[in-house]
Every structure is written in structure tokens, then in C-alpha cells.
Image (cartoon, rainbow, N blue to C red):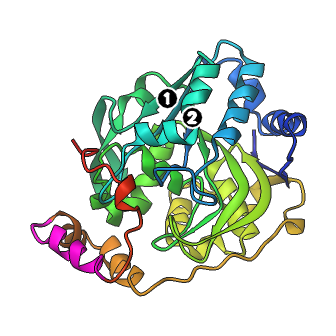
Amino acid sequence: MNATVYIEALKQTGSELADQFDRSALAVGLTQQVKSLKAILIKPNLTFPVYKEGVTTRAEFVRELVRTLLRIKPNLKIFIGEGEGGYNSFSMSDAMRRMGFAEIAVEYPQVELVNLSKVPARSVELTTFKGPYIVDLPEIFLKDVDCSISCPLPKVHCMTTLTLSLKNLWGCLPDVMRLKNHYMLPHIIPNILKLLKFEYAFLDGKYGLNSNGPMDGEAVEVNWFVASNSLGAFDSVVARLMGFNWNEISHLEIAHRYGCIPAAKDIEVVGDPEDLQRKFHLKRGLWNYPALVAFHSKRLTHFFYLSRYAAFLHDVMYLVRKRPIPPSLQDHHAHS
């Protein structure tokens, strides 16, 4: 079916929210497709070791999506997966437990939690505009999953301006130091979108993150519900909801060149996005700028994060700024 984006104000009560999920799944074609599938993977955005408004996808939102899928097909296998990553990573297995995702797996035996950094991975050669590029990808997507769903939040991001359904796929790379690939991020994401079978996006729009992100910033309550059968269409519409032009955001403009974002005329919008718009803004701090330069440079990324000077440089930096993740929540053994 054509690219469809379903938009409403987020319902607050259990029965109304369940009905909203049912209606949206039908509108974007998920209801019909699920009937023929054996296994689906849901990818939330869990970039912090505990639940944080506007930063991490709510377990209760994912639970309602799980219930919707199981109403359609009661014996469907559902994986909920996220990978560890970032400098001084934390244990994703522990984070999912703290945030309430383990309770979903207890409630529904069809659900399995997956730490994407701890499962077998396979090296895959991607075809990019910059030539062949090799990354490791979790085998679960390639062997066991028929379809994947991205569940982001509406967040600004100090490196990529926005992090929505496409940027959320970055967490599928299992390497806990995947930041070494940042300079290729706009070219990796369109490839893994197809390889990892991401066909749907559902926005946990209770809260968004304004001013700075992906972990710091101002949590704002927006109460948006957005679903789509095209991650590119979803990101273009949600970007507009947030007051941004998607074609001015580098990784989205490049995704368009890879054929991942349909033209506006080819997107059917169900609902009234104009009535829900709220202006977000990105305000980078002083320390964001050197990180931004390194983000786009293979050599500088290596120097700041992977060289023998990396630990010293970060210790000096944290003398004058707070750590994005408090030491009490860091797991320095997560890389082992």
C-alpha cells in the first residue's frame, strides 16, 4: 500500500488507547500483514539506563503495541530489542529490567527481550554512495524476524538535529563503540532500514525532548500519536510537527537520496497534523561543538574516543561539565 501516516492526539485511557492502536494498525496495513508473519521485533529508544521523560520510550507504550499485535495474531513471536552503545556504556539488559520491559515478557510468554549487543552478529557489506562499508548486524534480524517496528520519541539531538524512527535504528548496531561509525551514519541507516526489515513506526509521543538531546534537554508533554508504514514518511511528517524541515536535516536528506523518504504527494496523511504542531528548537551547548566536529570525522572520532589519549581527554572534560550518565548508573563492564 502507499505510504500512510496516521496522526491523532494521544489517548490517555486504556480502552481508548487500545482502540487507537487498533485503528492505526488497520490504517497503515499492519493488521493485514501481521496475520502472515511469525515474528516481529520492536525497537524502542532506550538511550538512558533508567526511564526518563522525553528520553526513553515508555514500557507502557510498547506493552500496548504488544497487546495490539497479539489481538491480531495470538501466537505471534515478539522480540523487544535494543543495543548497548556510547562512550562509557551501561548494561541494556539491566536498563530494560529497570524500565519495566521485563514485566511485559513475564505477562506475555510470546515476548522475548533481546540485548542486541549480546546476541550473535554477522559482518555485512553495505553498498553506500561512499563505496562498500562493512558493519556487524545482529543475526536475529536476518534469521528470526519477519518485520521490525521502530518506536521512537520526538527528540532533538545535538549531533543530528532530530532523532526519530530512522535515527532510532542506530541502536541496532551491536558494537558498544559504534560511535566509530558516526561519520558514515547517514549512509548506514538507509541500508540497515532494508536489511533489518523495518517497515513500521509508532511514536511514543507522550513526551518529547526539546532544546538539547538525546539525553539532556527539556522534557515537554505533547501527547502525539503517530503511526506509519514508512519510516521515511513518518520522519518527514513528525519533523514538520516539531517545526523542522526534514530536507534541511542531513541524515534525512541523504536518506531521501537513497529512496527512503517519499515525496509529500505520495504520502497519505490520516488526521490533522496542523492542529497538533508544536515548535521545538535545538540549542547546542559549548561542548556540543567539538563533539559535532568529531561526529563527522573518522580521524577525530578515533582521537577523542579510541586513541590512548581518550580517557585523559574525557577526564579533563568532565572536570568542567557533568557526565551525561551519572557514574552510579554506568556499567564499565558492559563492554566486556
Please identify the quarter of the rendering in which residue 34 is found.
top right
Q: Is residue 160 visible?
A: yes
The magenta stretch spans which residues?
307-319
Q: Residue 314 in the image: state x and y as whole percent.
A: 24, 72
Residue closest to the far front: 328
Q: Is residue 296 visible?
A: no
Q: Which residue is mark 2?
A: 101
Main SS, magenta residues: helix
Please identify the quarter of the rendering in which residue 63 is found.
top right
Q: Residue, x 34% and y 60% (percent of image)?
A: 327
Query: From the viewer's perspective, is residue 56 above or below residue 289?
Result: above
Q: Residue, x 62% and y 57% (percent of image)?
A: 261
Task: Indicate the amino acid at tag 1.
Answer: Leu
Q: Which residue is mark 1?
A: 113
Helix, strand or loop under label 1: strand
Q: Is residue 309 magenta?
A: yes
Q: Residue, x 44% and y 62% (percent of image)?
A: 186
